[in-house]
Amino acid sequence: MEDGMDTAKVMASRAPDGRGWGGDYWIENDGRCVGCRRETKIAIYGDGAVSADPRGVCGGRASYGLVAADHGATGPDVPLCFDCGNERERYEAALSVARRRWAVAS
């Protein structure tokens, strides 16, 4: 999918090599990354399996959410893309935003 597309679900074809996918899948937005503001993605397969693996069809936009309980807080999960979650400065900036959101939610 290209940046800026507003479609929640897009049907995609089987992986080119056909290995490990087990059928058709679709990409679903999982929220806007607090680091870079791009939509994060998850892949949902025909058998109901869900994947946010950056090595798969979602790439660097794979959903890598910040979970409040993992950081000793309460509140909603905060979307983060894999790219931002794996770059220290962007991760720390995103965690700062998440902590402010969790403080408001508690």
Image (tube, rainbow, N blue to C red):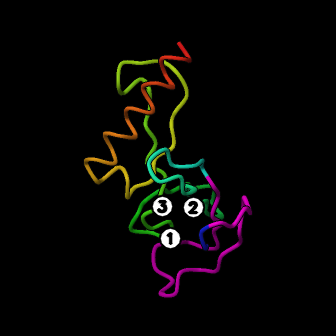
Residue at 63% x, 64% y: name it: 27
**Circle 2: residue type:** Ala
Q: Are marks 2 and 1 in contact (CB under 8 Å)?
A: yes
Residue at the disc numbered 2: 43
In the current view of this chain or complex, which residue is farthest to the top?
A: 106
* Helix, strand or loop for disc 2: strand
Give the CA distance from mark 3 to mark 1: 9 Å
Residue at 53% x, 12% y: name it: 106
Q: Quadrant of residue 11?
A: bottom right
Whether residue 3 sits left or right of residue 62 in the image: it is: right
Q: If you read the primary sequence from the N terminus, does the residue marked by circle 2 or circle 1 appear first? A: 2
Q: Residues within 10 Å of mark 3 (few under 14, many from 20)?
A: many
The residue segment tinted magenta is: 4-29
Q: Position of residue 15 (x, y in %)?
A: 53, 81
**Circle 3: residue type:** Arg
Q: Quadrant of residue 3?
A: bottom right
Q: Nearer the viewer, residue 89 or 14?
A: 89
